[in-house]
Amino acid sequence: MVASSVLGFPRIGANREVKKAVESYWAGKISAEALTKVAADVKKTTWTSLKARGVDLIPSGDFSLYDHVLDHSAAFNAIPKRYLGHGLSALDVYFAMGRGRQADGVDVPASEMKKWFDSNYHFVVPEFAEDTDFKLNFNKALEEYNEAKAIGIVTRPVVLGPLSFLALGKAAKEAKAGFEPITLLPRLLPVYKQLLADLKAAGVESVQIDEPVLVLDSAAGLEKRFSAAYVELEPVSPKIVLTTYYGRLDSNLTFVAKLPVAGLHIDLDRAPGQLDQVIAAVKPTSIVLSLGVVSGRNIWKTDLQAAIKLGQKTIDALGADRVIIATSSSLLHTPVTLDAENKLTPDQKDWFSFALEKASEVAVVAAVLSGSQDPKVAEALAANTASIAKRREFERTSDDAVRKRVAAITPDMLERKSPFAVRKEVQQKYLNLPKFPTTTIGSFPQTKEIRTARAKLNKKEITVEQYNEFIKKEIESVVRFQESIGLDLLVHGEPERNDMVQYFGEQLEGFVFTQNGWVQSYGSRYVRPPIVVSDVRRSGPMTVAWSSYAQSLTTKPMKGMLTGPVTILNWSFPRADVSRELQCKQLALALRDEVGDLEKAGIKAVQVDEPALREGLPLRKADWEPYLNWALPSFKIATAGVSDALQTHSHFCYSDFDDIFPSIQALDADVISIEASKSDMKLLNTFKHYGYSNQIGPGVYDIHSPRVPGEQEIKDRIASMLQILPESLLFVNPDCGLKTRGWKETEASLKNVVTAARWARQTY
Ligand code: GLN
Ligand code: ZN
């Protein structure tokens, strides 16, 4: 018998119940009990549906109200001291760690968030110090296992592994210089033992222990620690399925295959090439191989015949009872179900599989490989074969003009006319910005009114004209606000955008959209990624009318605002049939035309956001160059086709630039803004170290939390930035867009930003 398995499931609920309940709880509208009840119902529905779809190994313990890594830190008592002693409930401490808290005399910023591997999910970075006092505050895996068992469903609990937990964390501020969290392993293991022993005592047969760090180069240095840890855990634990995803094991396989584990999960969506090597390595052992053949990262229907081939090959080598058919990773990165989509054409709908449909896919593949005679299985397989054939047929069609234009890209299209030093002077005259210019990253609060107006437009309750009038008023008030507090380089506020990627996808040809395809970005923030289905082209200007209108309202310079090609691609579900390079360059050409149109319309600065450029970096260093070789040119194609006078900006979120510094410089944007408020000045030291030559606006405060930064706090930040960066290069701005913020804190925060910049002008 070949078992089927799902490694994790979206937590939002089919109707976004969890997101809504969490936000209501924050707003004080529902109680903790009510929130728990909503969560319990969603978990129940998930378990029941996975069972109904025929999945054998159903996950539990993967649910989260905010972030599963944060759950883990809370469970293991890795709670920074700043969150304690305020008389908060455990749940409120948990949310305070995730999103900060500023109420009733408590004022604590959020913990740092980071991109989860190469995905668009963010996790809350665990903080460790020498005196981190590990203990088991609660056992989520056990609780959920029991919750499922109570409704008659036996699950396989999921636990984040000890090595990944420590390796993904960082040293707390209080820790001594040079402290490395991984050294805490010997103190952490007893708590894991307790957790696993409790699972075993409860009758858990096998446990999924996630060690995604095993697909990173850095895991090579953890060999001894991995061995020591699993030798210690194995005897007390239910059977361990060591789970890796998002990449290949490579040389780490040598020690992984020797670990005393019952099973090993590998990602064959991202790294199909590793199968032979892994089979060979585990063959002499008794390790069961869990094959991640159904992508947890994309939304395309799996080619079941191809998956069956991989399964059969493994069975031939190891025997059927040593094979599990699984999703490649947790399905966290996919929407819940296609069922809710009724705007896609039947043809389009037939191309896709969301989380629940993927659950059926693993079940069907496992059933076929188990020799099932069930006619329903045969039917599902035949239907899949037909769908795949139809999609292949569609993929053969292309937009020849677009393909030709990509083929005709020349190196000179990638470079500005003059070097930055020359441009800087031209732009100084053209824009006339003061020293330490203040600006924002683009969006202003997306208020309830804005969302309501958009919803009404979508339901045709108001006309396009009425909607446009509404948006114009919004833009006007954002412009007036910026003028009134004295910001220097204005933005129009992006009220017309539902999302920075979706907005562009909707105006470009080649994309389709879901109605309910929500995917978690962080906490209660979900996005609905567009899907690239065919060649991409721009059918007309996308932002020019709004930017020109905003500019017409003011004599201050207005910054045009676009999302970059790499980010549009990385935050969409890409096609699987052509390279990402081709898709990205098509987007780049469309954006190049848009930037050109903005310049022609008299806009003096254009920001092309690339927050996803860094996160799109492959996990293995050996793969970076090929990626950067198309990602960097794509940004340059989009931004370099303008005169020296146009000031190009770009923005990056939580980014660690240490390793790709030359690439950021190579983008040659006139100004970049970066998140710097949470990872302190380390980032800026990198810029200094490498002698970054263009202008730079490191975020002076963290917008991901409603907390208002004090005036002095911002002045201090500017002062410390100026110890590192030259005065002539510094811009002053928040660290990201303000769309998720309310007006109250936005007003207060930005006023403090302007005051602090004015102070800096006098002081320096
Ligand atoms: N211009 C975008 C905004 O302000 C940038 C957001 C981002 O990079 N995440 O919303
Ligand atoms: Zn950002």
Image: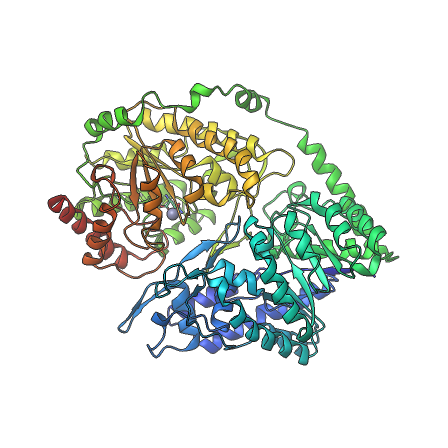
Is 440 in front, or is 272?
272
Does the image show residue 4?
A: yes
Q: Is residue 13 above or below residue 494?
A: below
Does the image show residue 9?
A: no
Left or right: residue 71 compared with residue 561:
right
- Check the image and name the residue furthest to the left: 762
Could you say where residue 257 lies in the image, as x and y percent from the top left?
71, 56
- Residue at 46 percent across and 73 percent down: it is 77
Task: Give the colour scheme shown.
Answer: rainbow
Quadrant of the frame with the N terminus: bottom right
Left or right: residue 255 compared with residue 492:
right
Q: Dividing the image into four equal quarters, which quarter contains ligand 1?
A: top left
Splitting the image into 4 quarters, where does residue 620 fall? top right
**Number of dots carrying numbers:** 0
Is 549 in front, or is 696?
696
Could you say where residue 635 lies in the image, as x and y percent from the top left?
44, 32
Could you say where residue 228 lies in the image, as x and y percent from the top left?
62, 66
Could you say where residue 332 lies in the image, as x and y percent from the top left?
57, 57
- Residue at 21 percent across and 31 percent down: it is 431
Quadrant of the frame with the C terminus: top left
